[in-house]
């Protein structure tokens, strides 16, 4: 499995309420994306940085998301360039379903 962190510094800080409204407007875009298990939207406590934490089935499926079109969408929506960082996730603890999942 692959974890991806995306982040971008906002031109001006936003509140949690503003972030929730913005994030809810883009959330449907991520439903049904092949290989995407979960996305968490994130906002720093000072409201100056936003982004996402994604859990993917594979790097190839993740890379299919972070295209130039996606970068353009982020830049137009938030007014800033995103960064994308990939991590391998060999083990996941899921307390919701009471499982430990190992990538084999």
Image (cartoon, rainbow, N blue to C red):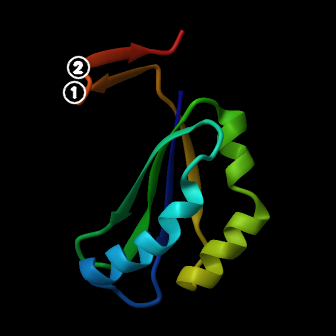
Residue 103 versus residue 27 in the image, above or below: above
Residue 47 versus residue 99 in the image, above or below: below
Residue 77 versus residue 93 in the image, above or below: below
**Residue 95 marker:** 1
Q: Position of residue 36 (x, y in %)?
A: 56, 41
- Residue 79 visible? The answer is yes
Q: Position of residue 64 (x, y in %)?
A: 74, 47
Badge 2 marks a residue whose secondary structure is loop
Mark 1 surroundings within 10 Å by alpha-carbon count, few (fewer than 14), some (14 through 19), many (20 or more): few
Relative placement, left or right, of 56 versus 71 is left
Relative placement, left or right, of 5 versus 93 is right
Relative placement, left or right, of 71 versus 19 is right
Q: Position of residue 10 (x, y in %)?
A: 45, 82
Q: Residue at x 48, y 74 (%)?
A: 25
Do tag 2 and tag 1 residues touch (Cβ < 8 Å)?
yes
- Residue 48 visible? The answer is no
Q: Viewer-proximal residue, 96 or 83?
A: 96
Badge 1 marks a residue whose secondary structure is loop
Q: Residue at x 57, y 85 (%)?
A: 79
**Residue 98 marker:** 2
Q: Residue at x 54, y 52 (%)?
A: 31
């Amino acid at each position: 499995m692959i974890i991806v962190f995306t982040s971008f510094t906002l031109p001006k800080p936003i509140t949690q309420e503003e972030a929730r409204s913005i994030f809810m407007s883009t959330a449907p875009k991520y439903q049904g994306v092949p290989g995407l298990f979960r996305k968490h939207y994130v906002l720093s406590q000072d409201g100056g940085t936003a982004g996402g934490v994604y859990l993917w089935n594979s790097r190839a499926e993740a890379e299919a998301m972070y295209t130039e079109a996606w970068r353009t969408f982020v830049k137009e929506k938030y007014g800033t360039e995103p960064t994308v960082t990939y991590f391998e996730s060999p083990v996941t603890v899921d307390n919701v379903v009471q499982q430990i999942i190992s990538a084999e």
